[in-house]
Image: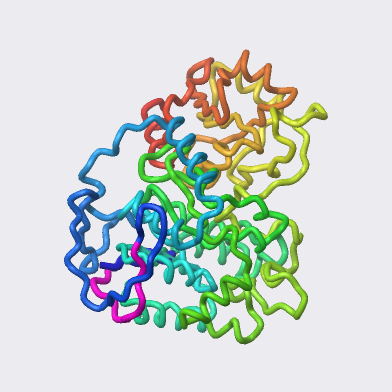
Amino acid sequence: MALAVTSSTSIAFSSSNSRTEQGVQFGSSNFQPSDRAFAAPAPLNVSRRRSLAAVNAEPKRNDSIVPSAATVFAPDVVDKQAEVEDIEKLAVDLEKASPLEIMDKALEKYGNDIAIAFSGAEDVALIEYAHLTGRPYRVFSLDTGRLNPETYKFFDTVEKHYGIRIEYMFPDAVEVQALVRTKGLFSFYEDGHQECCRVRKVRPLRRALKGLRAWITGQRKDQSPGTRSEVPVVQVDPVFEGLDGGSGSLVKWNPVANVAGNDVWNFLRTMEVPVNSLHAQGYISIGCEPCTRSVLPGQHEREGRWWWEDAKAKECGLHKGNLKEENANGNGSVEGSKSTVVSDIFESENIVNLSRPGIENLLKMEERKDGWMVVLYAPWCPFCQAMEASYVELADKLAGSGVKVGKFRADGDQKAFAQQELQLGSFPTILFFPKHSSRPIKYPSEKRDVDSLIAFINALR
């Protein structure tokens, strides 16, 4: 039984594979080809995994791609530190492994709680590898509403070729409407692509990943030397949260991280895998139509993405953990052992950037006109980066509600003050300043999704 996902809202499962080809059997230490056909798979035994529920008839109101059965069982209680160490060890063990072996290990380990992120470009290789393992798999894709017609046709071709249904995630219509009405259809050419990508890609992806424990991407080290040169084959996701919530709850697998682009294409040709027709027109890395163009011979593949912007930051936010730049922590030194850090985060017109005098004034007020939600953060902190999307969304939802949302950078010279006066223990620390209280109340949970934060606010105001 093959399950497919891409990056959108509707969920579909396929129950057959139409192709007959050479399969692969996995032994304890090596791979051996077999001549078995994929035509009529036996019924899937799911006794060892969460049960699978067919959801073609009516998608869940919840916008994530988590199967309905996953809401029935309480998540296992695990030692997150031990799990992080296990993933780090796994990354070392699999560093020299083939993409097929890495894919097989990922599907074996996470079953129905993992899905392949498919963008409609050469990462179709991931689907081929998953197909060759003979294991059930899911594929999801983000339909931003601005993809090339060729990409939509390619999605349909891939579904028919593998006998699967891609799970599509769509952006929130109200958010897209607000962005376009306020700033126009092509504002990203003037003020950068991050805002549009956040609405059309990052937030839908965040909703999708909240229903998973792991995801599989087509990142390669040679795709973007400035941002992806250190991509491991498996890692704890530094940006997004998974099914269990909190930092460290999602694992990212990158089976082709160590594979050169030419070798990926040789594999696709050898296996006669369908590809996007845009590739024949000079497109290599393919995204939204307004932000993607073909590249000239000798140009790097990512130069066709957001070509009007800095070549060192060719990311849309889906892999924001890759972005690094030299940046001191405020006192001329780098925080901890970090030699590079990301640029400032929590950028939104609905989030107030508080200075030291501003946060001190907020502390002194015993009667405030509005309640305040404030995050104490450091831009280089991966856990702060992981909650950026939810915090920006929180600020948007609370606009005009009587609760203001702010941020205070609490590393560097401000760290001692934040520890003594603002209850800073670790980054991020979230505080709520009620209207009629002189002291802020610290948010105690690691769950930093919008619903949990709003519930915290509603309980106190």
Q: Position of residue 200 (x, y in %)?
A: 51, 62
Closest to the observer: 240 or 274?
274
Point 20% across, 53% down: residue:
51
- Residue 21 in magenta? yes
Q: Is residue 167 visible?
A: no
Point 42% across, 35% down: residue:
447
- Quarter that holds the C terminus: top left
- Quarter that holds the N terminus: bottom left
Q: In this view, which residue lies farthest toward the right?
A: 332
Q: Position of residue 323 (x, y in %)?
A: 67, 50
Relative to 314, is 120 above or below?
below
Q: Is residue 212 visible?
A: yes
Coloring applied to the structure: rainbow
Instruction: Tell whether 365 sits left or right of 133.
Output: right
Closest to the observer: 183 or 232?
232
Dominant SS type (magenta): loop
Closest to the observer: 230 or 59?
230
Point 62% across, 71% down: residue:
285
> Where, by quadrant of the figure, is residue 429 drawn?
top right
Instruction: Tell whether 216 sits left or right of 281.
Output: left
Relative to 9, is 206 above or below?
above
* Label tally: 0
Q: Position of residue 10 (x, y in %)?
A: 33, 66
> Where, by quadrant of the figure, is residue 43 drawn?
bottom left
Q: Position of residue 106 (x, y in %)?
A: 40, 53
Instruction: Tell whether 38 sits left or right of 119.
Output: left
Q: Report the magenta residues as a range.
A: 13-25
- Residue 139 in magenta? no
Point 67% across, 77% down: residue:
293
